[in-house]
Amino acid sequence: MQSLNREIARTKTFVNILRSERFSDLADERFEVVLNRKVSNWETSTRSYLENTHPFKEHLCELRSAELDFKTHGSCEASILTDLENLKSLNKSANVSFWERKTLAAKNEVAMQENRTLKEILNAIRRNEQEAWRKEYEEQLLDWQLMEIRKLRTQFLKYLEEWFETMQQMKEVFDDLDIEPGLLWDLGADELTEQDISFLKEWAEYLNKAKAVRDLCELMGRLRKAERSDNTEIVHSTVRYCIRKPDLSSNEMMVGIELGRDLENVIPQELALLSDADVALLFDLKYVEKRLMCFSKQGYKEEIVEEVISKTVTVTDDEKMGPIIICLDTSDSMTGASEYVAKALTLSIVSRAASQKRKCYLINFSTSIETLDLTPPKGIRDLLNFLKMSFHGGTDVVPALYEGVRMMQNENYEKADLLVMSDFLFPRLSPDIVSLCKQQKQNDNRFFALAVTSFDNDQVDEEVFDQSWNYNTRRDTLSEIRHNCRYSVAENLIPTSFSR
């Protein structure tokens, strides 16, 4: 059994070797937890398989039945021969002839040993024969178990290698997307398939290659940049330290010589005066005058002292981002490059929002809407399912705007920015929705528009949107729309009105 436990425990060593040699980058607390759970589950399932699936169950039943019969009824010639048949069925090469000869010669042995009965000799034979039977069973069982463990471990390591490769690919893709582990995903995630990772990889490669799209991602990702401000604050801190003080009540060590008449601490040279009657009087005189030289002793004690320190510091606020609401048009007119660019932008913006710990709400619209709030525990799988969704019907942005305004009235999305990505091939907005958006803008909300088309489109409602841009998918150019005038974003990538 010890060999079995040791062989199972070796699996952890093989796992660590595989990981250190090929996947050393996979270092994450959540990853460690999931990996340890996988190894633990493998050990549990392997033990259960070895215990319940081995091919020696019938032999074990026969052996236990024979042992019980021997314990209850003892031995006879027939029972021994039956046991030997079972042993031979377990191992055809087992040496049973020895026991058969011993059994047949039992009567002669009784005649030679007058102090032993036939029953006692047969009992001894059957006991030793059953011990040999059990030993043979345990050896064959252990050999089979060790072989199965190695077979199962090979399969498990192959599974782990594929899982490690998947996690490695995920890490590379998310590094490209600047998504830190623990935000939308972690290294212990089991939820993504190879198809999902391939899907993400395509987006990451596209975003890395398309410079204009990267510029657009940079622009969209900087919605509502808060002003930096310096504040003066008084910071109080408590400092604890240990000091050492003399302890008058303790005499732990000698620290010097002093004059006195403390007989317990008189130095040996003074006590030597008492050995001579002629000078003993000098000792008495010194004692009376307290002029005997004595060892000076002293102890120390340690005290913990706390001190409150006040310091005036200047605190600089980091750039803080508000929540963002993205309305993504997946109607039929967006099919092709426009939808692909819009979804790539969505992935990039969500990635940046996650790294900045911004709340993010997605609205997929055509003539109806689908929504996704990426507040935890929502993660990358939910986002992928959202990005794979397409309506390919008509276009009606109004339900998406109504939903966006409704979310702005939620305390979690106060002062949120709303971005509509569409080709804007729909009629002008009704006065009701325009009025509602203008009213919401008074609550410090802002509305942005991005027209993603294969041509230059400036048909964006100025009353609703604070700023608007056009991305031409055919020329891969980005320009800002300003009151029927168009400016290249290359000249002014980040408009000053973004900063607050």
Image (spheres, rainbow, N blue to C red):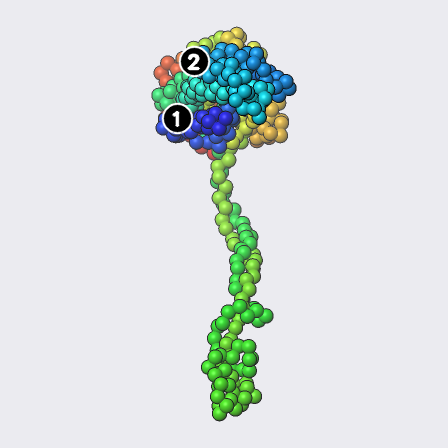
Instruction: Verify CB contact (< 8 Å) between mark 1 and mark 2.
Output: no
Q: Amino acid at mark 2?
A: Ser
Residue 479 on image: x %, y %: 40, 22
From the image, state whether disc 1 or disc 2 is nearer to you: 2
**Quadrant of residue 436 in the image?**
top right
User: Taking 400 as reference, is 482 left or right?
Assistant: left
Is 98 above or below relative to 8? Answer: above
Residue 26 on image: x %, y %: 42, 29
Nearest the eye: 36 or 496: 36
Label 1, label 2: how far apart the Cα atoms are = 41 Å
Is 224 above or below relative to 382? Answer: below
Q: Give the crowd class for mark 1: few <14, some 14-19, many >=20 residues within 10 Å.
A: some
The residue drawn where x is 53% and y is 12% is 81
Q: Amino acid at mark 1?
A: Leu
- Name the mark on residue 240: none
Is 100 above or below relative to 407? Answer: above
Identify the residue under disc 2: 93
Residue 106 on image: x %, y %: 53, 17
Q: Earlier in the sequence, mark 1 or mark 2?
A: 1
- Name the mark on residue 18: 1
Q: Residue furthest right?
A: 72
